[in-house]
Image (cartoon, rainbow, N blue to C red):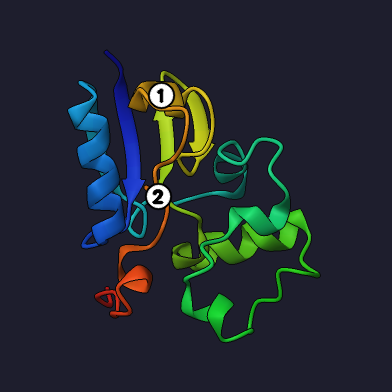
Amino acid sequence: MATIIFYQKLGCATNARQIQALKSAGHDVIAQDILNKPWDAEELREFFGNMPVEAWFNRAAPRIKSGEVNLDTIDAASALALMVGDPLLIRRPLIDVDGARFAGLGHEPVLSLLGRNTQDNLEECFHEANRTRCPQT
């Protein structure tokens, strides 16, 4: 089984569910706090691969929901600068499996690590689905 570095927001119920799914599939998960890691643009960019820039963002982030950050007009360099300054904007989880990096669970080899061919709603925000508020940290 794999050792997975999993960048999460501490206290996030969705991330906790995702970690449990990976552990249940037999993997070792090293959970890291995405908000306290000192990100730089180059390292962060490695997680997004060929994803469109607007998919790099956590759509539940307050600055996205308020419209302060417009995903329709943002370029890659501006996106990375915003995320380095405000990690709440980063799509979670960020996953590192043996140096291969991904944002979210909807990519291979992450789906294979889960033993599934779909995300089974593992990326759906627990609090939004239940119409509750995420703890502020």
Residue 131: image location, x then y, percent: 33, 79
Towards the viewer: 33 or 54: 54
Residue 38: image location, x then y, percent: 42, 52
Q: Residue at x 38, y 62 (%)?
A: 125
Q: Secondary structure at mark 1?
A: strand
Where is 39 relative to 116, above or below?
Answer: below
Counting other residues with Cα less than 10 Å from the Cα at mark 2, is it few (<14), some (14-19), or many (20 or more)?
few
Q: Which mark is residue 97?
A: 1
Q: Quadrant of residue 12?
A: bottom left
Q: Is residue 14 left or right of residue 53?
A: left
Q: Which mark is residue 108?
A: none
Q: Quadrant of residue 113?
A: top left
Where is 35 relative to 5, above or below?
Answer: below
Q: Residue at x 35, y 22 (%)?
A: 115
Towards the viewer: 34 or 25: 25
As measured in the structure, the alpha-carbon distance from the residue carrying label 2 to the one carrying label 1 is 21 Å
Give the mark nearest the N terminus, 2 or 1: 1
Q: Is residue 54 left or right of residue 8?
A: right
Where is 45 relative to 55, above or below?
Answer: above
Q: Residue at x 30, y 17 (%)?
A: 2
Q: Quadrant of residue 21?
A: top left
Name the amino acid, label 1. Val
Name the amino acid, label 2. Asn
* Quadrant housing the N terminus: top left
Q: Mark 2 = which residue?
A: 121
